[in-house]
């Protein structure tokens, strides 16, 4: 059996540049594709999920250019819903952050598109999202197992009154919210029970606002979205670093600093996980906030 021995560290100090958040990267790519105008995304995450989203957008006719290191992407927006000229199958691997938003967005208008993926993807439930889209008029068929991919999408989403279980994945609500502004009718999304993962919904609402669309959020119990809207490119968009990844480095600074500085997130971050830095500060660390960095210096720690 192989073993890994970690020696005690006397001091930690330095700067870490965080790669872009996976969920923000794919949300931003899809909105850039749906928007009017050209969007330059920087600090994009180079990951399987993002690659599958880019491949799907390319198959749907979206034009983009990607830097050699795959972290800068210039997307020419479609100015409305994505359309397939003919029947199309999109393979999305195990990319949940591509499958869920695309399953909703491709129900706009009239398409004939199959979304499929690896065997693991076919074990990941999507029934709650499909039920909600069907309430809005979408025509969706399960091609293998009920409530699981692969899916056949044939358009039809009109908007209207939709109910979503608040206890399931926030990615389902995110997919509906991002799709609803492009529907022919207004959409009213009612949440059953308490909504989990509110910070992730805040990320979605903030990103939609950046692309020119505001949602009436009624205490996370109802979301009212006007139909017949259009996303507008913000021009340049910096994908925030992943805040949960930052917590490990900030904690190292708190325990064995020195000062550890993480770049790619800052005081204006929309990710709830940056509040971990507040906890470190309350424990006795010195935390410094900038627009695009957080730094943590060791202090006398207390529980």
Image (tube, rainbow, N blue to C red):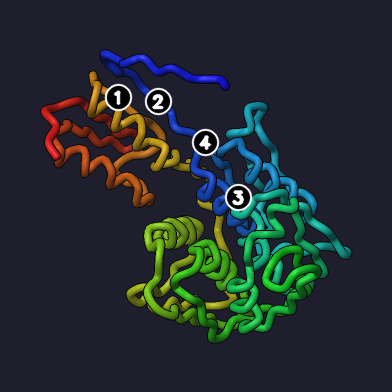
Residue shown at 44% from the left, 68% from the top: 214
Q: Is the C-beta separation of discs 4 and 1 under 8 Å? A: no
Element carrying mark 3: helix
Q: Nearer the viewer, mark 1 or mark 3?
A: 1
Q: Nearer the viewer, mark 4 or mark 1?
A: 1
In the rendering, at what x and y percent does residue 159 appear? 59, 81
Give the crowd class for mark 3: few <14, some 14-19, many >=20 residues within 10 Å. many
State which tag comes first along the sequence, 2 or 4. 2
State which tag comes first along the sequence, 2 or 3. 2
Residue shown at 67% from the left, 71% from the top: 147
Element carrying mark 4: loop
Give the residue pinned by disc 2: 16
The residue lying toward the viewer, choosing from 163 and 266, is 163
Q: Which mark is residue 43?
A: 4
State which tag comes first along the sequence, 2 or 1. 2
Q: Is the C-beta separation of discs 2 and 1 under 8 Å? A: yes
Residue 87 is at least partly visible in this image: yes
State which tag comes first along the sequence, 4 or 1. 4
For residue 89, which quarter of the picture?
A: bottom right
**Considering the image in quadrants, where does the N terminus appear?**
top right
The answer to whether 80 appears left or right of 150 in the picture is left
Whole-number angstrom distance, CA of label 4 to CA of label 1? 20 Å
State which tag comes first along the sequence, 1 or 3. 3
Whole-number angstrom distance, CA of label 4 to CA of label 3? 12 Å
Q: Is the C-beta separation of discs 1 and 3 under 8 Å? A: no
Give the residue pinned by disc 3: 29
Residue 57 is at least partly visible in this image: no
Whole-number angstrom distance, CA of label 2 to CA of label 3? 25 Å
Q: Which mark is residue 260?
A: 1
């Amino acid at each position: 059996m192989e073993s890994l021995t970690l020696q005690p560290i006397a001091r930690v100090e330095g700067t870490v540049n965080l790669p872009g958040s996976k969920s923000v990267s794919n949300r931003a790519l899809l909105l850039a594709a749906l928007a009017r105008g050209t969007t330059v995304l920087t600090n994009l995450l180079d990951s399987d999920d993002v690659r599958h989203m880019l491949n799907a957008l390319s198959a749907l006719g979206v034009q983009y250019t990607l830097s050699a290191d795959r972290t800068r992407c210039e997307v020419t927006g479609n100015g409305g819903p994505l359309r397939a000229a003919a029947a199309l199958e999109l393979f999305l691997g195990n990319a949940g952050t591509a499958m869920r938003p695309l399953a909703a967005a491709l129900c706009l208008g009239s398409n004939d598109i199959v979304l499929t993926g690896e065997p693991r993807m076919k074990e990941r439930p999507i029934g709650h999202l499909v039920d909600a889209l069907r309430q809005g008029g979408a025509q969706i068929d399960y091609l293998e197992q009920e409530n699981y991919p692969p899916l056949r999408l044939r358009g039809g989403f009109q908007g209207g009154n939709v109910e979503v279980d608040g206890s399931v994945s926030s990615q389902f609500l995110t997919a509906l919210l991002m799709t609803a502004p492009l529907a022919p009718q207004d959409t009213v999304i009612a949440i059953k029970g308490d909504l989990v993962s509110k910070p992730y919904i805040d990320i979605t609402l903030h990103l939609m606002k950046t692309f020119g669309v505001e949602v009436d959020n009624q205490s996370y119990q109802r979301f009212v979205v006007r139909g017949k809207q259009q996303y507008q490119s913000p021009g340049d968009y910096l994908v925030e670093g992943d805040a949960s990844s930052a917590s490990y480095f900030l904690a190292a600074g708190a325990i064995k600093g020195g000062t550890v500085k993480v770049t790619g997130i800052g005081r204006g971050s929309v990710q709830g996980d940056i509040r971990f830095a507040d906890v470190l500060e309350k424990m006795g660390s010195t935390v410094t906030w900038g627009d695009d960095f957080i730094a943590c210096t060791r202090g006398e720690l207390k529980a």
